[in-house]
Amino acid sequence: MTSAAPDRPVGDPGWPCVSGDAQGCRLRSVVVPQAGVDATVGLHDGWLRVRIAAPAVDGRANAALVAWIAAQLGVVRRAVEVLHGATSRRKVLALDCDVATVERWLDEQRRGWPRG
């Protein structure tokens, strides 16, 4: 018998924004640049909504996103890559870590999200 993560409702299949593959995992995100702070703020259509303080100029928001996600997950920057969507708000990140690590981080992040 499997059990849900501590903050996850019983029967919750996991995070729709995360998927695993042989190389690590993928994180689907919607990025809001020039937001004043770096933070996750919830899900939007199954994509993780991330606010990044850096502006979307000359790749600065992408670089800040990669650095922030790497720091949050405790991995080196080269373990995080913008795989798709470099010039879009919707990005798919390739993460060189296991899905369980990302899901634990998301469970922690969810505690700070507005209820609604």
Image: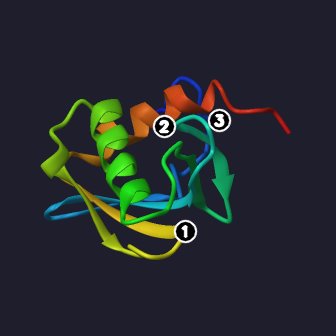
Where's residue 68, x and y in %? 36, 39
Q: Which residue is drawn at the image coordinates 19% and 45% (left, top)?
A: 77
Name the residue type under label 1.
Arg
Residue 9: which quarter of the image? top right
| Residue density around tag 1, few if under 14, some if 14–19, many if 20 or more, within 10 Å | some
Position of residue 25 relative to residue 52, above or below, is below
Label located before the other in sequence (3 or 1): 3
Query: Which residue is at the front of the view, 78 or 26?
Result: 78
Query: Which residue is at the front of the view, 10 or 16?
Result: 16
Residue at which label 3 appears: 9
Q: CA–CA distance between discs 2 and 1?
A: 20 Å
Q: Nearer the viewer, mark 2 or mark 3?
A: 2
Q: CA–CA distance between discs 3 and 1?
A: 29 Å
Q: CA–CA distance between discs 2 and 3?
A: 14 Å
Position of residue 113 relative to residue 88, above or below, is above
Residue at which label 1 appears: 89
Label located before the other in sequence (2 or 3): 3
Where, quadrant-wise, is the C terminus in this rendering? top right
Res 78 visible = yes
Residue 101: which quarter of the image? top left
Q: Which residue is drawn at the image coordinates 42% and 40% (left, top)?
A: 103
| Residue density around tag 3, few if under 14, some if 14–19, many if 20 or more, within 10 Å | few
Name the residue type under label 2.
Leu
Whether label 2 touches label 3, CB < 8 Å: no
Q: Nearer the viewer, mark 3 or mark 1?
A: 1
Label 2's element? Answer: helix
Q: Which mark is residue 106?
A: 2
